[in-house]
Amino acid sequence: MALVGTASGRAIVGMGKGGDQTVELDRVAEEAMLRILGERAPERHRVVSEEIGELGPRDASRVVLVDPVDGSLNAKRGLPTFSTVVAVAAGRSMEDVFVGYIEDLPTRAWYAAGRTEGFTMSRLVEPASVGEQIELILLEASQPERHEFSLADVARLVDEPARAGVRVRSLGSLALALGQVASGVADLLLAPVPSRAVDIAAGLQMVRQSGGGAAALDETELWKQPLDLERRAPFVAWRAGLDGERLLPRARRLLG
């Protein structure tokens, strides 16, 4: 946290295996994450991390996906919306994830999910939305030139006349956005960009365990995606109580 919003934290130190520049803040956070895993992990595991890539025995029974700083641009600039993310899987695809953990580093709020424990969080928030009402849509579209839709198009995910009450927000951290959907704070997350498993595996587990759902926007199978560092399908996620079968075709049309 001492590096957040500082020139030294923004210093470029290399190129991560995920294809993005690694800055000092990323390096220090990943180093700490790998050290703790090495000291405390109860089983042999293979790590998949955005900076270092894949590390550990290929025949390990567990895959641990980590993004030490999700929302690193926010952290580098000093915008207080970023998180650390851990997911544990018993196989090599998204459907094999059985534990997810996200921590909002500036606030220390956390979100967690397991297959037997369900979804839980440290925040004392009562979801405002019930049933089919959609009021808050989160949009994660990092580079404007990649997208040709308007915010008015995003509002068309909602039936008339309820569109007038829709609001759109962007957090800059996919993991935290998924946590907000799982908790019912947000109704929808529209992520029209290819996303890495390290960013979304934990949050998708939370959405599923809380009774919500998610699907790829390019008609691939989101839950069959490999747990690697390749940017894969854009997707949409929705909270419990919403009809994904109705929302998904509209979200796919939005991307043309």
Image (cartoon, rainbow, N blue to C red):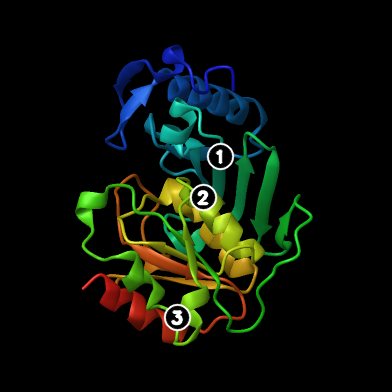
Quick one: label 1 or label 2, which is nearer the N terminus?
1
Please state which amino acid type lies under the numbered disc 2.
Ala
Quick one: label 3 or label 1, which is nearer the N terminus?
1
User: Residue at 61% across / 53% down in the picture?
Assistant: 99
Q: Nearer the viewer, residue 3 or 64?
A: 3
Distance of label 3 from label 1 (alpha carbons): 29 Å
Give the secondary structure at mark 2: helix
Q: Nearer the viewer, residue 46 or 35?
A: 35
Judge the density around disc 1: few (<14), some (14-19), many (≥20) Cα neighbours within 10 Å.
Answer: many
Distance of label 1 from label 2 (alpha carbons): 7 Å
Image x and y of residue 15, in percent: 28, 25
Disc ID at residue 158: 3
Task: Kindly identify which residue carries mark 2.
Answer: 175
Identify the residue at the far top of this view.
8
Quarter holding residue 8: top left
Please state which amino acid type lies under the numbered disc 3.
Val
Total numbered labels placed on residues in the image: 3
User: Residue at 46% across / 79% down in the picture?
Assistant: 163
> In this rendering, which labeled residue sits more in front, label 2 or label 3?
3
Give the secondary structure at mark 3: loop
Task: Kindly identify which residue carries mark 1.
Answer: 83
Quarter holding residue 233: bottom left
Give the secondary structure at mark 1: strand
- Position of 56 compared to 151: left or right? right
> In this rendering, which labeled residue sits more in front, label 3 or label 1?
3
Image x and y of residue 198, in percent: 44, 46
User: Residue at 34% across / 80% down in the picture?
Assistant: 250
- Position of 94 compared to 228: left or right? right
Tell me, yes or no, if residue 89 can be seen here: no
Please state which amino acid type lies under the numbered disc 1.
Ser
- Mark 2 and mark 1 in contact (Cβ < 8 Å)? yes
